[in-house]
Image (cartoon, coloured by chain):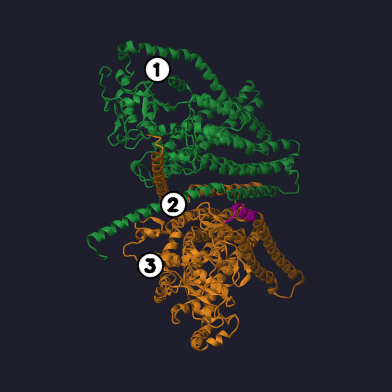
Chain colours: A orange, B green
Amino acid sequence: MTKKRQPQSDGDMSASPNDSSEESAVVFPPTYIIVQFSKRIRATALVWLVNKVCSKRLDGGAELLVRRQPHRDGEGVTLHVSASKIKFLEVAEELELKKRDRCGLIREFTVSQLDDFLEDGMHVDDLLTTAERQYIVRHELENIRTLKEDDQVPGYPAFRLYEGQSIVQMCLHWKLVKRMYPLHDMEALDKLGKKWYWALFQKQPFEDIRLYFGEAVALYFTFLGFYTTALLVPMFLGFLQLFLPTESIAFFCVFNVLWMTVFLEVWKRKCSELAFTWGTIGMTSLDEPRANYRGVMGIDEVTGRYQPQFPRWKTNARLYCVSLPIVFVCMVGAFFVMLASFWAEELLLNMKKQQSLEAGEIVVLLPSIIYSAVVFIMNSCYRKVATWLTEWENHRTQSQFDRHRVTKLVLFEFVNNFMSLFYIAFYVQDMDMLKNQLAVMLLIFQAINNFQEAILPLLIKYYNKRVTKALKFDAILGNKKTDESGRKKKSLSVNHEPSRAILDYIPELDSDDPRIELAICEGEMEDYEGTYDDYLEMFIQFGYVFLFSSVYPMAAFWAVANNIMEIRADAFKLCRLYRRPVAKRVKDTGAWQRAFEIVGAMSIMTNCSLLCMSPQLRRLAPTMTSVEWVLVFVVLEHMLLGIRHFLHLVIPDRPEWVRVALARINHLSKRALKNERMLKSRRHILRRYKTVHGSHNYNS
Amino acid sequence: MTKKRQPQSDGDMSASPNDSSEESAVVFPPTYIIVQFSKRIRATALVWLVNKVCSKRLDGGAELLVRRQPHRDGEGVTLHVSASKIKFLEVAEELELKKRDRCGLIREFTVSQLDDFLEDGMHVDDLLTTAERQYIVRHELENIRTLKEDDQVPGYPAFRLYEGQSIVQMCLHWKLVKRMYPLHDMEALDKLGKKWYWALFQKQPFEDIRLYFGEAVALYFTFLGFYTTALLVPMFLGFLQLFLPTESIAFFCVFNVLWMTVFLEVWKRKCSELAFTWGTIGMTSLDEPRANYRGVMGIDEVTGRYQPQFPRWKTNARLYCVSLPIVFVCMVGAFFVMLASFWAEELLLNMKKQQSLEAGEIVVLLPSIIYSAVVFIMNSCYRKVATWLTEWENHRTQSQFDRHRVTKLVLFEFVNNFMSLFYIAFYVQDMDMLKNQLAVMLLIFQAINNFQEAILPLLIKYYNKRVTKALKFDAILGNKKTDESGRKKKSLSVNHEPSRAILDYIPELDSDDPRIELAICEGEMEDYEGTYDDYLEMFIQFGYVFLFSSVYPMAAFWAVANNIMEIRADAFKLCRLYRRPVAKRVKDTGAWQRAFEIVGAMSIMTNCSLLCMSPQLRRLAPTMTSVEWVLVFVVLEHMLLGIRHFLHLVIPDRPEWVRVALARINHLSKRALKNERMLKSRRHILRRYKTVHGSHNYNS
């Protein structure tokens, strides 16, 4: 295969992509996405893919600009992908990106109204943020869908394609494309870092975060800040409680759960404000489908576009009839594993007592250690299952997909993280043990997390840097040297090396381009898998703080202490330790809002039960029968749940100004539709009258 | 005053209203609204009002057509109000009435697209239903708002007006206008009746009901039908239960509460389907304000129209800081009245036992009878208070007003109707008494209601007809006779008789016009105060059936039996016994939906408690401690509430097709807005370039 200069491809290799004289002459625009191909990919497939990326939209292509990174031995082809200025604007219009116009109104961007969106002194290039550009390039890449004639990947008869599939997604799935990631912008990153993780006691620069990392990340950090602020009150109450009699805990506890309800409601409002200013508030499940959405190609009922169609009831049927039972079984499984660990521990303790087991303290800890390991393994398996199931359910939009995936994961995590505490609280009923366990879990859990998130990757990075720096430069230099002389040698090298013809086919970046090192560096960084783990951490913390706040009021203090560190650590991690995450548009915290709310409702129940079980409180009413005592707390719990429901109803989900602004946009667009129709029907009537008068003259 | 032929009015009386030659020549179009003035109204005020109704919109008028009914001694002026064909269409466009177009799409009606809305063979006059025409005329009447120069009602210096108030509403408030009601259309009514209350075993003609009575009434009857169908399952289970051991009641009870949850969720979906086909689904709290909405005149933020403005936070402050506490106090008051009645009854029973009270059985019933009377009085007082409070809160739209008024009333009714049952169930804990009480209340309550609704008005009507028929015709004939000869006599009659000048000023209907008798007849009918009482009846029934279904499963049977009668009785009542109700546009059952849902949630709690208290069930688990037994039911209750919440989340509020259709409309209007802006900015750019090139030639 490597001998022929003309590769066997259906791709047209007569002219290089992006090879028009103007394009080559100018500097290649900033790289937004790096695409690394597998080094084993066949030449035909590679050419076919590159052609898809570069060719005209009419031919099913993405019209993007590509440059190849100078080749390094033993590595696959790496492409730098960018787009022309006009392409960015066109796609921005197509994706209905919302931008603030001169009048301060947030509306959909259109190219023809470009001027409306440019504030005084603003250049066209500053209109789209880097996050948006990245999002646009990625969207275009992922939106290359198979045409009718593409029934397989060229060179891979086994990889069958169906019309309307996302080619890039399928290639990632089959590992023909190794990975795809956006490039960091070091200058912007330095600026952001100074305002963010180095400015310890200042407000986080939310807007800058959004511009650089996209809405999903910005929303997470806003939530983190907001939640930490809200925690200050329970923290203060926790301190106050130290100086008051134990019985007062009932009041604090009641206050805490109500405070938490209000916090969640206010957060929802804040979310809608943010979503409005970010232009994401109108996102619905009927939007542009995500890349992996599969279905028969057809006319979309809403937009009239040609898109994959998949009936909603099928998704629901899969969700409720298959996924739900599987998740439930997994949860029960995890619960029994937890029970088994407790039983084993008890057994060992008994053995130790009775037979004076000699093996020492460590043996008693064994079940806990094994349990932790098992949980770790279960977790990673379950994560795969949940992702696969959600993929199979075939949700239309990314938000829906995320919501259902997160829901599945959270349910499982809930069992793993909280069930042991429930067991201790309500089955063993040992409050001191519960308190200790809580303290340990809160501290250990947070320490591990911080270590895992910030310190470990730093160490790894530092180690990697020292080891690979030399190697890397050698490779680059080596590559350069062999560039001229070693052509023949290379064409005789291992089968997996791409042929010279292909390398020549794709225009190369200058070998001294700083982007090359950046791309290599980032390629070696760890992948940031989205905000899931970060939210999960907060969720578990939230549970620890509120579910058992009547037993361990100091939890809030530890949480605040952790979060203040966490904000900066997460920021640092995101900027320096991970590959740049793909910008994601979101309008709310999705499944997390509901998860927090449900834990909120549960915390009312658990705290009432704990108060009911408290011997200190029981002593206050010695004349009550135990049934009466239980009923008192059942009534209290119902009242709190009632108040919670009332707050939920009374606090509107959207602030008044957002409602008015949305209603205004709605009103304007309805009026525009009316006008449009009026014009149309006027034209129609005119035409009809003309016909009537011209031919028959009925009316005269 | 009556001596002068030229009345002292600011109104221009030189030309009669609607006096153009064409208008007078043709027959006056069908009357849609009757306006009866007080017989004491001063001439200046009357002329001013009539001028407002008839004059051009630019002068602050409503541009409606009026005819005076031939005068009857001792009665005020009665106007028949109608509108020209083009006026109806214009207002229909302004009110954004939704109509189905030829393509089956439901969209806002516009005059210029009239043709689009006319199906083949449909005449323009058939486009708007009588309910809609009525609604339009009434809206126009109520929408006559005071101008800057109207600082008082002419002739009444005490009646001060502020800019932007609804003049008709204020005159109704000051009793200058006695009443305002739409006229029945006897032909349409006969047709409707045949399909509705005479067709006992057929589906109700919902569409015809809507066309004649408007959306609110149609929705009530749809609900009634749907709810009765849903009750068949509990009824069947109630019968089944008779043949099974008592313990089985737990299962039936659990099934019932879940069934009821599903019913309420499905009803919400059905509601949104109906609202979509009726074109009311888009109603929000930012719509056109209702007539009594008070506020400073200003530019509306959403529509840009000149409308009264009142800050939302003030409404909320009034609602939560004033109304809510007052309502709460009233509820507590009603509760104590209920307790007092129970105590009095107990006291009398004890007295009878101990001192062998001789006064007989009736004395023991005395507290109940007094209590009923007190409740009746309290209810009517409270209704006034609630209406006044809601008016004072100043809600923007009619739907909001209704929702908040209904909420207030329902809370109070809940205490009056259910608290005694709660008292018996959970304080006295006498299940047999509860069962008897339930049976009695269900039967008596329904019997009284049916009597009150259908039979009593029928009797009154029959009696009235016989007495007044003679009188009425005498009056008309007498009026006719004195018409020519008695002019002088009349001008010398009591001060309150309107002067001849005024009577002449307003064109008169032919004295043999059939509308005159109709108007007089209807004027004597009782006023239908909206669907509130009908819903309330269903609500109370719903409570009786579900709140205590574990004690008295046969309740469902009685409810079904009643409802089958109720549907026809309500229909008959509405068509024949009441004045024609004003058509009201609604999109859902408003506060009732929530009220039913809350009773639904409460029924889970009450039934679990009742089951817990049941000695038959307790016998099944003799080894359990009482605390354990209570906890079993607490857990059961929580599980049921959890399932309810889950069902609530899982069943979407709108069916998929409605969502898609709405998204489609949204998409189309957004696209239209984009196009409109594109055109505008193109024009803008062209103009700018022209200026640039024309004057300075910067760019060349």
Task: Give the side of residue A664 with respect to residue B526, left or right.
Answer: left
Amino acid, disc 3:
Asp
Residue A562: x percent and y percent?
Answer: 51, 67
Q: Of A558 and A452, which appears nearest the observer?
A: A452
Within the magenta stretch, is there residue B212?
no
**Amino acid at circle 1:** Ser
Which three-letter amino acid code belongs to the residue tagged 2?
A: Lys
Magenta span: A309-320
Other-residue count near label 2 (Cα within 10 Å), few / some / many at <14 / 14–19 / ≥20: many
The residue that mark 1 highlights is B511
Q: Is residue B73 left or right of residue B242?
A: left
What SS does tag 2 mark? helix
Chain of the residue on which disc 1 is drawn: B
- Residue at image x 43%, y 12%? B474
The front one of A593 and B476 is: B476
Q: Which residue is most to the front? A: A695
Does A336 sit left or right of B213 as displayed? right
* Mark 3 surroundings within 10 Å by alpha-carbon count, few (fewer than 14), some (14 through 19), many (20 or more): few
Give me the chain letter of mark 3.
A
Q: Which residue is mark 2?
A: B670
Residue under label 3, please give it: A125
Tell whether label 3 touches label 1 (CB within 8 Å): no
Tell me the chain of label 2: B
> x%, y% of residue A379?
63, 66
